[in-house]
Image: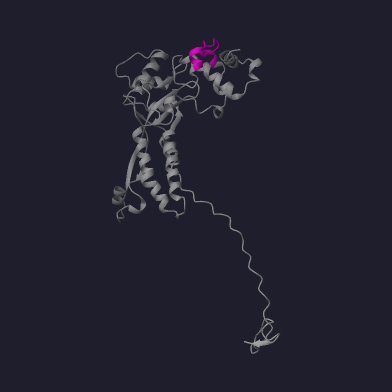
Amino acid sequence: MSPLNLASAILCDDRRTNHDLPPPLRLSLIYSAFTLHHFLSSPLFIFPDVVHHHPTPRCVSPILFKQRPLDKILAPSQMSPQLLPATAAAFAPRASSVNVVLGSEVELWLTRTLKRINRAKRPLNSVLQHRIFLTEKLSSKNAIWTLTSIMLSKAPESDLRKDSNPLIEALFNFQLIHIKAYTVHVDMVLRNEVVFKLTPETIEALVEYHKEIHCVDVAASTYNWLEKDLQIKELHEKFNQAINKFVYRTNAIALEGLEEEGAGELLCGKSEEVKNNIMNLFLPLFLPTPKAVGIIRPRTPLPTSTLCPHQPAFQMLPLWANGCMMYAL
């Protein structure tokens, strides 16, 4: 049985094949069938060989998805976080087109949102027209979203200006960094989510702050040890990797904040969530664990002398010195 036939059997609730498939394989097969049904020509997903060399299973249809939702097949915790386009990977450039997957029916809120920004009065009478219009808007070069804004210091703590007026102190010592991102993926069938990736300018600003200010502050707040500089360098490298891998996944209803040129802002308090996720990447410098030291027990003191204070002490002379005479010191 071919992999896609297995996927078809899984989606059709075929008990002959469901019981002996491990969950990871079931997930892969289900997603392969789903991918073929909705975007056969897309080369961006993690199953390109299946997409290009196998026919679409017949039982994958909008009616089937309605009868047996995918969230009943796999819980959200079991869905792999790696089901994203290649452009969502770390250090990957922005794609020329955003991957958009819509269901068999368009949500009413999405239709209202697209009509609000549809100045050219383009027809939006089908799922295909919705998908093309949304893809064009999100793929625009100006389609940059403001996820949140973070207040960060301009200099290390030791170089901050001290002033009795807190307003002047804030103006000279702090800066507001706007966290910009672009859309890399919209999935309104499998996970009902939209995925954002930070712009290169935002990543560069955060990396510079981490190196020039955060690392300096954590170094000044800890004592010196032999490998301290090496650990600070490793700390910065971990942040560089983490901030380049950072993607923000949220419910697709966030697209309600879409504006005319494809840009937008997060609504419903999601900006605070983004801020917390980014600030959690600024890790402290962990101090080295102290080495185990053996316990030195005090020596047992020798018994005190029984001589009287006024009695002179004597020393035994060697045999060659007058035999066994005692000589007073």
Compared with 242, 26 (above or below) is above
Quadrant position of the C terminus in the picture: bottom right
Compared with 129, 283 (above or below) is below
Q: In this rendering, would 280 be left or right of 121?
A: right
Among the 4 quarters of the image, the one containing residue 179: top left
Indicate the position of residue 68 as horizontal and vertical percent values: 57, 18
Q: Residue at x 45, y 43 (%)?
A: 234
Front residue (pair 285, 31): 285
Label total for image? 0
Indicate the position of residue 320 as horizontal and vertical percent values: 68, 82
Quadrant position of the N terminus in the picture: top right
Indicate the position of residue 122 as horizontal and vertical percent values: 33, 14
Front residue (pair 162, 209): 209
Q: Residue at x 56, y 22 (%)?
A: 27
User: Was residue 52 drawn as part of the magenta stretch in this picture?
Assistant: yes
- The region drawn magenta spans 49-65
Front residue (pair 230, 261): 230
